[in-house]
């Protein structure tokens, strides 16, 4: 039975880079907020600088604006980390002849996203590689009606050899052909 079902886990927003940016933006934003508030009240709220000497208009006001923006963005990232947006799994089931793609979304009506495709509707496994400033290396499920469903999560691009090996293993498991998109 283990040879008939394959399940690939997908890591969502709980990646090191998101933790880093949430903490970095929060600490930087709080520092900017404190600097702007220090310039308004003419008291030093930061132990490592003296922002009380800044003129409130325009420097202090701009610092408050950027601090608020940074803290707001860090709160958003912390919330996506807490909810684990984008996590889930891809299940390839030869017994039921189904491919299930399950992901977590934002809370509400569509918190759990479930896409189910019969194996008979799948034409091939596709690989798309685009190099450049923003390289993309993805594996797709190519359906008979020309839709292409991405199977790989958003992450740092894998090496081309790893991507090809993963796609070839999946195509071999599902008895499908492998094509370049």
Image (spheres, rainbow, N blue to C red):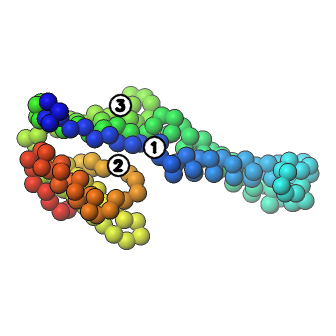
Vertical arrangement, residue 140 with respect to residue 5, above or below: below
Q: Which numbered mark, 3 or 2, is in the foreground of this view?
A: 2
- Check residue 13 in the rendering and tell me which mark sits there, or answer none: 1
Q: Quadrant of residue 56?
A: bottom right
Q: Is residue 33 left or right of residue 131?
A: right
- Distance (Cα) linking label 3 and label 2: 16 Å
Q: Which quadrant of the structure image shows residue 132?
A: bottom left
Q: Which badge, 1 or 3, is on the more N-terminal residue? A: 1
Q: Report the residue marked by disc 2.
A: 153
Taking depth in this image into account, of 175 and 1 the one nearest to the observer is 1
Secondary structure type for disc 1: loop
Q: Which residue is mark 3?
A: 112
Image point 14% across, 60% down: which residue?
179
Q: CA distance from mark 1 to mark 3?
A: 15 Å
Closer to the camera, 142 or 172? 172
Q: Residues within 10 Å of mark 2 (few under 14, many from 20)?
A: some
Where's residue 13, x and y in %? 45, 43
Which quadrant of the view contains residue 157?
Answer: bottom left
- 2 or 1: tag closer to the N-terminus: 1
């Amino acid at each position: 039975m283990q040879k008939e079902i394959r399940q690939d886990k997908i890591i969502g927003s709980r990646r090191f880079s998101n933790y880093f940016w949430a903490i970095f933006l929060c600490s930087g934003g709080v520092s900017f907020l404190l600097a702007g508030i220090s310039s308004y009240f003419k008291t030093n709220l930061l132990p490592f600088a003296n922002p009380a000497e800044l003129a409130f208009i325009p420097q202090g006001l701009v610092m408050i604006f950027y601090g608020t923006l940074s803290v707001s963005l860090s709160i958003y990232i912390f919330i996506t980390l807490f909810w684990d947006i984008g996590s889930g799994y891809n299940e390839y089931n030869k017994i039921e002849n189904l491919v299930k793609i399950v992901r977590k979304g934002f809370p509400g009506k569509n918190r759990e996203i479930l896409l189910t495709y019969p194996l008979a509707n799948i034409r091939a496994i596709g690989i798309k590689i685009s190099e450049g400033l923003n390289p993309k290396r993805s594996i797709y499920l190519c359906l008979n009606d020309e839709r292409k469903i991405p199977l790989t999560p958003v992450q740092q691009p894998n090496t081309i050899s790893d991507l090809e090996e993963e796609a070839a293993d999946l195509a071999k498991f599902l008895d499908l052909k492998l094509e370049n998109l």
